[in-house]
Image (spheres, rainbow, N blue to C red):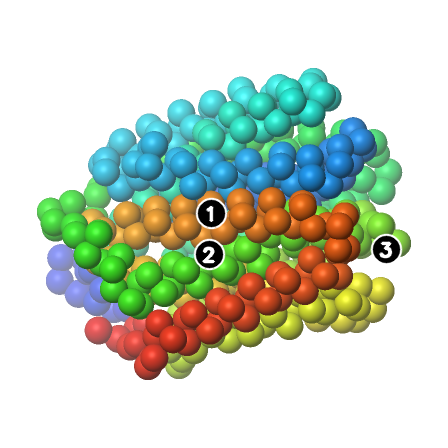
């Protein structure tokens, strides 16, 4: 696996115009971790709901079990405290979290009762949710002088996601639904293995600066961004929890479901790869606002035109904007708003508020409305959450901030 990192002509002391040249071997190992981490997500998120349905869980129970990941993402940034340790300390947390996740997930191979599955999922999610903030902290420090290169490493997570989605989708056409448990378990084993390959390297000199995170959070641009990100995760919740179930109920085979997920992630990969040039031409505000408009359009189509395969393909291609461009632009914004040591604290807030609180609220709301008002209207309010996020960001950022490659 090779990770391309664009460098300028080296300057004195081995610098490349941005600062120290990133350790290519370390970048490749980080890419391998992202690959395995998101391969697990690709094998787990789209299909585990199908497994839970095979256990005769209700939509509310499915939503509650699947929401544990989002619930724990609200908790773990403050329990594990990413960014408060050296890179070596983050690596120890990462390895422990991966091993503990493996032990906890193993229980899901055997338990079938709702209470036991929920408990095991909560424990697994608690440790699993500590892993990504830790590896993000390591990655951000390595790329302290080249934050725009984040997407070039992170895209390997999307590649892993695509491969896992396609593989599990193909297997579910021929194998029992228990594949949706056993393959994710094997991928957690692989995740733990990749943590053993990582080395701490050098901290990027971001620890000497005093952080004033509370003051930063009170800035309208920052609080507005976090609120908009919260709404973006609410908008995506029904998609992540129920999309595979919805498609299968409308006559799509698991293999086709996997293909649609793959289209979305291919679009995401392209967005990650192109983000340095996109952000050189367009402001962060413009990219983010466009992503919120795209999410509204996407989920209206998913809700009301699910039988139209061509429109479902188009809706999945919009994932390049609604996640790939959105997430890369959000990370670039956080890098600007939270300089130095505060960068990781900013990401902790982003993860807790967006993927944590937003995913939890959205997942529970989707589980509560799915059987009551139906899938079409559930996806309609998802689109409404995206429009509300657009309005929040428009008001919070009244004028375009600097382009991401300036300053």
Position of residue 146 measured from the top left corner of the image (x, y, whole percent)? 29, 61
Residue 319 placement: quadrant:
bottom right
Which element type, helix, strand or loop, lies under badge 3? loop
Residue 241 in sight here: yes
Q: Is residue 18 left or right of residue 287?
A: left
- State whether residue 170 is above or below residue 85: below
Question: Which residue is identified by label 3?
Answer: 250
Q: CA distance from mark 1 to mark 2?
A: 7 Å
Nearer to the camera, 160 or 341: 341
Q: Bin the neighbour count of mark 1 within 10 Å (Cα to Cα): few under 14, some 14-19, many 20 and up.
A: many
Ranked by sequence position, the earlier of labels 1 and 3 is 3
Which element type, helix, strand or loop, lies under badge 1? helix
User: Residue placed at 69% from the left, 30% from the top?
Assistant: 181
User: Residue placed at 33% from the left, 33% from the top?
Assistant: 80
Task: Please identify, in this view, whether the residue under mark 3 or under mark 2 is nearer the observer.
Answer: 2
Question: Which residue is identified by label 1?
Answer: 357
Q: Bin the neighbour count of mark 3 within 10 Å (Cα to Cα): few under 14, some 14-19, many 20 and up.
A: few
User: Residue placed at 54% from the left, 22% from the top?
Assistant: 104
Nearer to the camera, 371 or 316: 371
Q: Which mark is residue 230?
A: 2
Callout 1 touching callout 2 (CB < 8 Å)? yes
Task: Please identify, in this view, whether the residue under mark 1 or under mark 3 is nearer the observer.
Answer: 1
Ranked by sequence position, the earlier of labels 3 and 2 is 2
Q: Residue furthest front?
A: 372
């Amino acid at each position: 696996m090779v990770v391309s990192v664009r460098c300028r002509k080296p300057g004195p002391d081995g610098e490349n115009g941005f600062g120290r040249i990133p350790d290519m071997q370390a970048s490749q190992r980080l890419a391998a971790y992202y690959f395995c981490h998101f391969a697990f997500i690709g094998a787990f998120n789209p299909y585990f709901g199908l497994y839970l349905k095979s256990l005769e869980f209700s939509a509310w129970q499915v939503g509650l079990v699947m929401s544990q990941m989002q619930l724990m993402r609200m908790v773990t940034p403050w329990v594990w405290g990413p960014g408060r340790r050296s890179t070596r300390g983050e690596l120890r947390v990462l390895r422990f979290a991966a091993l503990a996740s493996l032990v906890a997930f193993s229980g899901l191979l055997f338990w079938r009762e709702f209470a036991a599955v929920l408990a095991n999922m909560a424990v697994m999610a608690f440790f699993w949710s500590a892993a990504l903030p830790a590896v993000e902290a390591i990655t951000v420090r390595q790329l302290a002088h080249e934050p725009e290169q984040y997407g070039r490493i992170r895209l390997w997570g999307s590649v892993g996601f695509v491969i896992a989605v396609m593989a599990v989708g193909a297997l579910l056409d021929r194998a029992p639904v228990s594949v949706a448990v056993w393959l994710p378990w094997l991928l957690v084993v692989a995740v733990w293995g990749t943590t053993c390959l990582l080395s701490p390297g050098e901290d990027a000199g971001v620890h000497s600066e005093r952080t004033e995170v509370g003051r930063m959070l009170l800035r309208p641009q920052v609080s507005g961004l976090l609120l908009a990100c919260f709404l973006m995760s609410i908008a995506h919740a029904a998609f992540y929890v129920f999309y595979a179930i919805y498609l299968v109920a409308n006559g799509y085979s698991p293999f086709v479901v996997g293909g649609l997920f793959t289209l979305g992630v291919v679009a995401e990969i392209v967005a990650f790869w192109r983000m340095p040039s996109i952000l050189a031409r367009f402001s962060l505000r413009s990219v983010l606002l466009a992503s919120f408009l795209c999410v509204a359009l996407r989920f209206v189509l998913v809700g009301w035109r699910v039988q139209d395969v061509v429109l479902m393909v188009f809706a999945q291609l919009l994932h390049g904007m609604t996640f790939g461009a959105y997430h890369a632009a959000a990370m670039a914004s956080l890098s600007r708003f939270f300089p130095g040591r505060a960068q990781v604290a900013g990401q902790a807030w982003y993860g807790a508020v967006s993927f944590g609180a937003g995913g939890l609220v959205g997942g529970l709301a989707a589980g509560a409305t799915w059987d009551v008002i139906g899938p079409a209207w559930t996806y309609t309010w998802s689109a409404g959450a995206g429009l509300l996020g657009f309005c929040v960001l428009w008001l919070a950022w009244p004028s375009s901030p600097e382009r991401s490659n300036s300053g």
